[in-house]
Each structure stands twice: as structure tokens, then as C-alpha cells.
Image (cartoon, coloured by chain):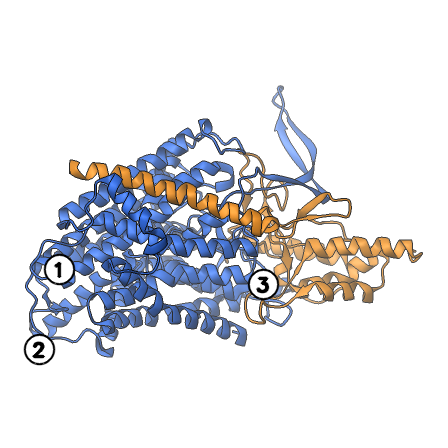
Amino acid sequence: MWSQCRPAIVVFVILSAITGLAYPLLVTGIAAVAFPWQANGSVLKNRSGKAIGSRLIGQYFSDPKYFWPRPSATSPVPYTSYNGPLGDCGSASNLGPTNPALFAAVKRRVARLRTADPAEKGSVPVDLVTSSASGLDPDISPAAAFYQVDRVAKARGLPVAEVKKLVKQFCRGRDFGILGAPRVNVLELNVALDRLSSAQRAAGHGPR
Amino acid sequence: MTPNAWIQMGLFLLVLVALVKPLGAFMARVYEGQPCGLDKPLGWLERLTYRFAGIKPDQPMNWKTYAIAVLLFNLLGGLVVYALQRLQGFLPLNPAHLGAVSPDLAWNTAISFISNTNWQSYSGETTMSYLTQMLGLTVQNFVSAATGMAVLVALIRGIRGKQTDNIGNFWVDLVRGTLYILLPLSFVLALILVSQGVVQTLSPYKKVQLIQPVSYVQSTTNAAGKTVHQTVWVKHQVLPLGPAASQIAIKQLGTNGGGFFGQNSAHPFENPNPLSNFLEVLAILLIPAALCYTFGRMVGDTRQGWAIFAAMMIIFVPLMIGCVWAEHSGNPKMAALGVNQSSSALMSGGNMEGKETRFGVTDSAIWATATTAASNGSVNSMHDSYTPLGGLVPMWLMELGEVIFGGVGSGLYGMLMFVIVAVFVAGLMVGRTPEYLGKKIEAFEMKMATICVLVPPALVLVTAALACVTVMGTSAIENPGAHGFSEILYWASSVGNNNGSAFAGLGTNTLFYNIAGGIVMWISRYFLIIPTLALAGALARKKPVPVSSGTLPTHDALFTGWLVATVVLIGALTFLPALALGPIVEYLHLWH
């Protein structure tokens, strides 16, 4: 047994150095040169160069003039991606399919959408009233975006057709037509929406 | 189910099957010590390791020496992972200033990662420093996988050995498997993943300003004992970063499954888009599937490997279709609430609770099936929120003993135990001494195989029962009714079969769950490795018997069917009563 101690220790040290230091550092180095933007969190900047979020991490919007993202079960507020070393920011709801709390939450969310836009009578796309796995889902389905167009247009005093056009512009189909599901990036859409509003204001078509 | 769901499943299986032979043949060359192409650029590292460690690569080991080497190496790994977690506060590469991990959690995590389970009772971004993630967890992602593969290769050498004690040299199998198989594949996958948006940096977490600030009401108790409500405004979001891609690549390829971030492969920084998702889910099954071919090549009859691969596929494919179907069907109670779950060109539809928009239900359910067929356990959706039957599929796949692909190495050596049981039962039926690949299967071999087949189910049922009858166990339950029992059963199935996925509502970062889980993961890994190596030793010493007219062919459709029946029967008989109390009764509640 003792004869195996030296190989155990030496092999462990060498393999640790290779797989635990050399390998991640080499990947980090190559990533920093080849894909610096992606490797550092795909951070979006506004025109003045200020970081306004990550393209991949959702943000919470509750104002009727913005497109709302999917419900998020993170705490203390939705879409908390990190809340300090002691803050367990949580995540998914983990509600089971028969849990009354799930149905109560869905009911509440449907009611909130209906209150914000009483004219919209159609059934609500499921992703808009169910919480995501990460609590940070950056996307909603195109159906969920179109569902909100009337409310957003009204709140901003923009023509519905303009807003719809913008949503269409940000709709992404499945990757290569096959993989994944169709989606719209909410943060990008809302940033573009703010730009559209200020462009309209500048052109004198501001809110009446 | 939509046509797209069928196309996605078909594409996944097609690419997987196409890669089995090339990768399987390559791995056979690596373990046979033949030139494999990569020994040119990396051979110096291999030779350097042997020189410093005093290893003579062609020195044979008998099964006991091999087992001692495995256990020593794993023990050392466990101690280092434990120490890194406890001491990380004093060590470098800790930009988030994370403190020492509690002893019970550190124990659980150490065993979890050395045993290739990668159960996580913590969130990486709030618990583990960059150094712990790299030097502790990433290392074990590699070497626990390489250990599993080494044990498999030792068993193969036992099967084909001719009256010898030699089942190979663990150090050589470990080093070659890590350097020539896991490292190059991970390196390539990690870089592709970074290009898609998986983070890879040593920079500290990044703070960004929110477009719309959010407020919440914080309730605190003041000095007078009164509750005070205070509105707090959140204006920033902190993006957790780190060297994630390098860990995620090996986490998937080595059937480890421990996420860099708490939300695992559902976290957009781990799995940013459908393409990264496709590559990651493919990586889960890649090596376990290809090892079937490696096995066939190494025993000198590739048909033997394909027969086992076919048996795995026959169980895997219907379960995958079932899971995708169940999740597409959605939750029947939603329609009455005014919710639209139907799939269309504009939305995934289906049961979207706990799933990500970019994956939809199809990619989520494919992943759930693959990650539990293999003992990976990473998740891109929350299994706790699956429909009752959708959640039954991953649970039962683990309960089959992690032999439908299973862990790298461990899945196939587990399946070979079922093969021996199948051969034995068939032999009893026709009244002949059972044999497999020219080796007589006798009392000792059957004892070892039976231990390997029965230890995990016994562990699962006993620990699930224990958790169900103690307050320590039941107080962690989050969902009421039958689903609460499912949460416990899923936990026990996961740790008892070294999978590591969870019905995550169960709050398992408690003393009871951390310690019990640690013990169970330890038993189910090493109490299977030892009998497996003992079996390898016993088979190696046997004299091969020539094929005769009475030999049961083990490469044809009949035997494949027989093997499927054996696995399914044992899995069903053992777990149907427990499943009836959990997902099945929940299904009846929901739909009737």
C-alpha cells in the first residue's frame, strides 16, 4: 500500500497543476484575446459608454411602458443575479405541478397583465406567467412580446404599428431553423424602444 | 408534440450515433497504449509524470493493488477539496471575498466531487472562490471521470485476460485518460462555449446600472423589538463572472454535472443559447456512448459493444420521447386560468414553469433525459416543476442504476454487471454453465455482480425511507402532497446512484442531508468500484473456454432484448411501489 503513496501524491499534484491551473488559465488567455466581449459577460453599453446590463442576463421591468420579462423567483427582487456572499439570491420557484401556490401565482400574474391592459382579452402566453429556471431568463417568446404591444404603445403614445415593427425586428427564430425555441431579448427590445421614443420626441411626434 | 420536437430529437441522436465509432476507436488506442496522435504534442507530459512519480508504465497491477491505488488517489483528492473549501478565505483568487465553507457542506461537496456525483447543496457564485472552483472542483471533474474510465478499462482487461493477475496499471490509465481524452475534448469545447457567451475570466464580478430601478420592502426588527418596514431601492445588478467555460466543458464531458453557478446549465452565463445547449447536451452522452465501442474494440469483437449500445438506446429513446411529450402536454389546470400553452411558431408553449425561453420544452426535456440517463446531473430546467410523468422519467432513469449510458466508465461497468446477471439467468433457463466472452460465470462473479446491481437500489430506498420518517428529513420538503415525497425520493435516487441532479425545492443544505448524502454517495461509488475490480481480477485469472454450440451469443438482437428486459425488470420491480406513491399518484391527482 505504501508503495502507491508516492505515485498517488505526485500524480495528483501534476494532474492538479495541469487541469486546475494550466488548463483554465490557458482557456482564459485565449478567450481574452479571441472572445473578450463574450468571456466577460456580453456587457451592453449605452451611447455614452456606460454598462447597462448583459445581453444574456435579464432585467426586471414592471413599468407599463416597457415590455415585461418572465416572472423570476430570485430575491430580494426579481432578476437578482448576485446579492453578496451571504445573500442566497435563489433562483427558480421549484413549485411542483400540483402545488396550489403555483396556480395562485399564475392567477395573480394573469390578473396583473389584464389590469394593465383591459382591452386585451386573449389567453396569456404561458412563458409570460411562469417563472424561468435561472430567474435570469433574458428572453420572452415572440407571442409574449406581441401580447404586450398594445399596452406598451399606449403607455408611450406610440403608434401600435411602430411598436409591432420593432418587436418583429427583435424576434429571433430557432437557431439554424431547428435548435431551441423562438424568442425576443427583452433588454435589447426595451433599449431600442427607449431610443424609438426619444427619436419620435425629437421629430415632434411626442406623446400627446 | 410538434414536428420540430421530432427533428430536434432525431438530430441529437443522429449526431451522437455518428460520433460513437470515431471517438470509441480513439479511446481504445489510448487505453491500449498505442499511438493516438495526441501523444506527439502531449507525450512529454505523460513521461514527465511517470518519471517524477516513479511509475514504470508497463508494470502490471493485480486487482488489489489497482483498487488500493484508486482509493488512495480518491482519498487524497477528497482531503484537498475539503481543505480548499475550509481555507479559501486565506487563499488567493477570491475576488468576492467568500469565507470558509461550513464543515458539513464541505464534506458533502468533497465526496460529491470525488465520486463523480457532483451533488450541490450550494450556489457556486456565493460559496466557492475562483481558486476552489479551479484547483478543487475542476480538477476533480477531470480525475473522477478518468477514475471511472480506468476502472472500466481494468474490467475489460479482466474479461479478456488469460490466466493472469494483470489488469493494467491504474496510474497509466488515469494519466492517459486525462491527458489524451478529457483534456483535449474539454479544451476545444470550452473555447467554442466562450465564443457563444459562456464567461471565462478572472476579473471580479461586474456591477451594471439597471434601466428601471426596482424597489422592495425590507422588514427588520429594531432595538425595541418592533418590526420596521423600509422601502429599499435596487439600482444595480451584479453580474457574477469567473473561469466558467473551462469547468463547464469538463462538467459535461466527464458526466460530472456540478454547475459553476447555482442555476447550473439554466444560467445564461453557463448555457447562453440553443447552440451551446446542443453541444453541452451532446457532451453529456458522448463519452459514455463511445465507450461501448471502445469496449467492443478492446475485447476484439465490436458487435459486443454495439449490442450493449443498442440495449441502452432501446431504453433511452422511448423515455426521451415520453418526457418531451409529457412536457409538451403542459399542465391541465392552466387553461382555466386563461393561459395559452399551445406550441406555435411564436412560442414553445407546454409546461414552461422552471424552464428557459431559449430552450423551450423540447430542449429542456431532451436535456433532462440525457442528464439522468448519464450520471451527469446538470440541469437546464428545474426538474421539480416538471409534470408528474415528465419528472418520473429522469427519476426512473437514475433508479435503473445509471447504466443507460451512465457515468463515464461507471455506466458501462455497471451495465456489464447487468450483462453478467442476464447471462446467468439465461444460463439457468437452458441448464448450462453461463459464460460471457469466453469466461465462465461462477459463484464469485455472480456475488460481485449482484452486489453492484443491488447496492444502489438498497441505498436509495433505505435513505429515502429514513428521510421520510424523520423531522430532519421532512422539514426540507417544499411542495405539499405526493410531490413532497417525490422530492425526497428524487434526492435519494440521485445521491444513491451518483447522479447529482435534484428536485431542487428540497432544502438540502442541512446537517442531516449533507452528512447522509455524503455517506450515500461514498458507498455507492466505492462499494461498487471494489467489487468491480475484484470481478476483473477473478475473470482475468480464468482460462478462456472456446465457443461451442451451447454458447449463448451475446451480440445478437435476442441477447440485446434480454439485457433490456433484465435492466427494466429489476428497475421496475424495485421502484414501482415507491414511484406509485410519488409521481404516479400525483399524475392521477392532476389529470383526474
In the image, which lettered chain appears orange?
Answer: A
Q: Position of residue A207 (x, y in %)?
A: 90, 55
Which of discs 2 and 1 lies nearer the camera? The answer is: 2
Does residue B586 show up? no
Residue matched to label 1: B446
- Looking at this view, is B206 or B180 the one in front? B180
List the single residue furthest toward the bottom: B549
Which of discs 3 and 1 lies nearer the camera? The answer is: 1
- Looking at this view, is A194 or B479 the one in front? A194
Q: Is residue B319 left or right of residue A118?
A: left
Q: Is residue B239 left or right of residue B280?
A: right
In the drawing, what numbered circle is on residue B334? 3
Q: Secondary structure at mark 3?
A: loop
Q: Colour of chain B?
A: blue
Examine the image and state in which quarter residue B512 appears: top left
Q: Find out whether the residues at labels 2 and 1 contact each other: C-beta distance under 8 Å.
A: no
Residue matched to label 2: B550
Q: Is residue A164 left or right of residue B20?
A: right
Q: Secondary structure at mark 2?
A: loop
At label 3, the amino acid type is Met
At label 2, the amino acid type is Gly
In whole angstroms, how far apart are the C-alphas of marks 2 and 3? 59 Å
Dot 2 surroundings within 10 Å: few (below 14), some, or many (20 or more)? Answer: few
- Chain of the residue under the numbered disc 2 shown in the image: B
